Amino acid sequence: MMNSKPNCHLGDQRRRASTGLTRIAVIVILAVLALLAAVVLPALLKARELARRIGCVNNLKNIGLGYRIFSTDHEGLLPWATPSTNGGSREWVADGNQTFRHWTALSNELSTTAILICPSDLDRRPAHFLWWHAAPPGWPATTNTSRISYGIGLNADEENSRTILALDRNVTTNGVPLGPGRWVVSTNQTVGFTSAIHEGAGNILMGDGSVQQATSARFDELAREAFRSAGVSTNTWLIP
């Protein structure tokens, strides 16, 4: 007797063939995903950098508050104008390798060592202790500049809002990056930022505690304003 039932196996194969993805469909899907990634990923990266820069601004604002507290407790003087016998760091002003000492002098006014690292400065990690003599064995302390992101403006004056108190370390003069050390910058030099931090921009802590988010061009303007307002032809910066 012949089987009058339809060929179920053949029907299943046809249904699978009709519902499966073709090679062209797969290519189209992959192309759409690649396009979405190309559009969304830069926006995500930009948002992340914006968050990091806001964190950097907050760090500098807290540092500015720390300097204000220090000067209030030291007759209006900042750490580098105060002798070490009175908790300052004046003895190391001329040594660009001792920049960390000006930060350790501020340690009592800082909530955490983490604020000495800019969130966008991915090559640097914060120290566990600011005071080099207080760190337990094996714990990193701020005994060198590799655990600091911010430079210091030695010509800063809290009574002069246009002077520069601190700034991101990715500084250039005449297009040349400044390495760690003590740098005397004159009015005939153009200053700016490298692309190492904040994509070629930077944050600057002014003498009055405010923070400026600046492009290289704006940084150069601020530096020239600092020269004019302080009545000097040079500014000295300690870059970590």
Image (cartoon, rainbow, N blue to C red):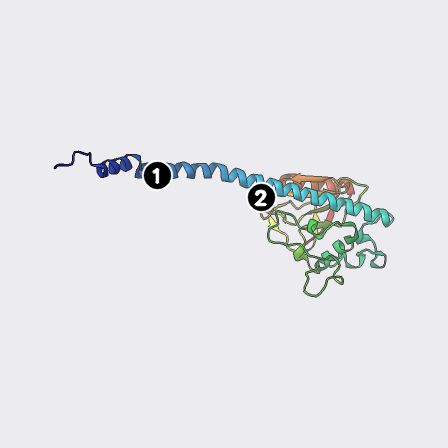
Mark 2: few, some, or many residues within 10 Å (few <14, many ≥20)?
few
The residue under label 1 is 27
Give the residue displayed 57% in from the left and 39% down from the top: 47
Identified at 68% across, 42% down, the residue is: 57
For label 1, the crowd category at 10 Å Cα-Cα, with few meaning under 14, some 14 to 19 and many 20 or more, is: few
Q: Is residue 38 above or below residue 107?
A: above
With 12 as the anchor, is 65 left or right in this view?
Answer: right
Camera-side residue of 205 and 95 = 205
Q: Is residue 80 left or right of residue 21?
A: right
Q: Is residue 186 above or below residue 5?
A: below
x%, y% of residue 178?
64, 52
- The C terminus: image quadrant: bottom right
Residue at the disc numbered 2: 199
Disc number for residue 154 = none
Residue 104 vertical position relative to residue 49 in the rendered view, above or below: below
x%, y% of residue 2? 13, 36
Q: Amino acid at mark 1?
A: Ile
Q: Nearer the viewer, residue 3 or 60?
A: 3
Question: Which residue appears farthest toward the front when viewing the image?
Answer: 1
**Marks 1 and 2, the one that precedes in the sequence:** 1
